[in-house]
Image (cartoon, helix red, strand yellow):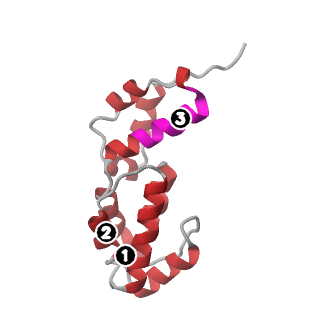
Amino acid sequence: MIATMSIAALALAACGGGGGSQDEVADMVIEQLEADGVDADEDCVRDAAGELSDEDAEKILEAGSDGEADVSDDAEAAASQLMSCVDMGSVVDSAIDDMVAEMGEENVDADCIREATADLDMAALEEGGGDLMTAMMECITIDVGG
């Protein structure tokens, strides 16, 4: 899920432009976010994608949603704008679902994670997410066997 957010941010990490290819990039990002259970403001995503240059939009489309596009360095504004388009509650819920699926419900305290992430914003994830991981680890039981 966090990987999806990173992919989406990288997908919009470019500047300038607007139009057909940019609309296709927005569609791709929205589809990927929806597939991962993340709610986003579609108009906001489209505005962020509209900031892409034609060249960067084409590179992103060629790379696809799982690929890594080599886009321009002036891309941080569009990527940051995308992060503001995402509902953090749905990001947390998606992360919890992923953890429960992988680790088992008995090892993941969903309420604890929700409380630990209540004041989190996407900027914290962009800066590395170390505080997020520390808070979440307190909500997870890891059985090392014995």
Q: Earlier in the sequence, mark 2 or mark 3?
A: 2
Q: Are marks 1 and 2 in contact (CB under 8 Å)?
A: yes
The residue under the point 36% across, 45% down is 90
Residue 99 painted magenta:
yes
For the residues labelled 2 and 3, the Cα–Cα distance comes to 31 Å
Q: Nearer the viewer, residue 140 or 19?
A: 19
Residue beneath disc 2: 77
The residue under the point 32% across, 83% down is 16
Q: Nearer the viewer, residue 98 or 10?
A: 98
Percent across and percent down for residue 99 are: 53, 35
Q: Main structural element of the magenta stretch: helix, strand or loop?
A: helix
Three-letter code, disc 3 = Met
Three-letter code, disc 2 = Ala
54 relative to 78 in the view: left or right: right
Quarter of the image with the C terminus in it:
top right
Three-letter code, disc 1 = Asp
Q: Nearer the viewer, mark 2 or mark 3?
A: 3
Q: Nearer the viewer, residue 43 or 55?
A: 43
Residue beneath disc 3: 99
Residue beneath disc 1: 74
The residue under the point 58% across, 27% down is 104
Give the structural element (helix, strand or loop) at label 3. Answer: helix
